[in-house]
Image (cartoon, helix red, strand yellow):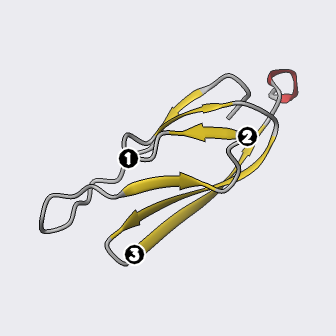
Amino acid sequence: MTVGDVVCFTVPLSSVDGVRGTWETDNERVLNLDPVLGIGKVQAVGNVVVKHHLASVYTFVDLEALAVDVVR
């Protein structure tokens, strides 16, 4: 992903009550992320871990945000 991108995270799971879980980022300087919708905007170059929490289960992905001129 590159600086300025809008990204949408989704998980096709929900709890028995219909709860979809929450999203979080470990670096809001790089990725500003809405915890309910899973929609974020890449703000800066760097690394970020995006986590999804549903009940007692956490899933995560490591991502790198690049400057637009670095992508080829």
Q: Is residue 6 left or right of residue 38?
A: right
User: Where in the figure is residue 36, as x and y percent of width and height?
Assistant: 37, 45
Q: Are marks 1 and 2 in contact (CB under 8 Å)?
A: no
Name which quarter of the figure residue 54 lies in: bottom left
Name which quarter of the figure residue 19 lies in: bottom left
Name the N-terminal-most of marks 1 and 2: 1
The local crowd at label 3, few if under 14, some if 14 to 19, many if 20 or more residues have their Cα within 10 Å, is few
Which disc number belongs to residue 10? 1
Which disc number belongs to residue 51? none
Q: Residue at x 68, y 44 (%)?
A: 28
User: Where in the figure is residue 29, as x and y percent of width and height?
Assistant: 74, 40
Check disc 3 and report the residue beneath it.
57
User: Where in the figure is residue 40, as x and y percent of width and height?
Assistant: 54, 35
Check disc 2 and report the residue beneath it.
30
User: Where in the figure is residue 1, as x and y percent of width and height?
Assistant: 67, 35
Q: On screen, 31 above or below 5? A: below
Name the N-terminal-most of marks 3 and 1: 1
**What kind of residue is marked 3?**
Val
**What kind of residue is marked 2?**
Val
Q: Are marks 3 and 2 in contact (CB under 8 Å)?
A: no
Q: Residue at x 83, y 28 (%)?
A: 67
Q: State the SS at label 1.
A: loop
What is the CA distance from the residue labelled 3 to the residue labelled 2?
Answer: 24 Å
What is the CA distance from the residue labelled 1 to the residue labelled 2?
Answer: 19 Å
**What kind of residue is marked 1?**
Thr
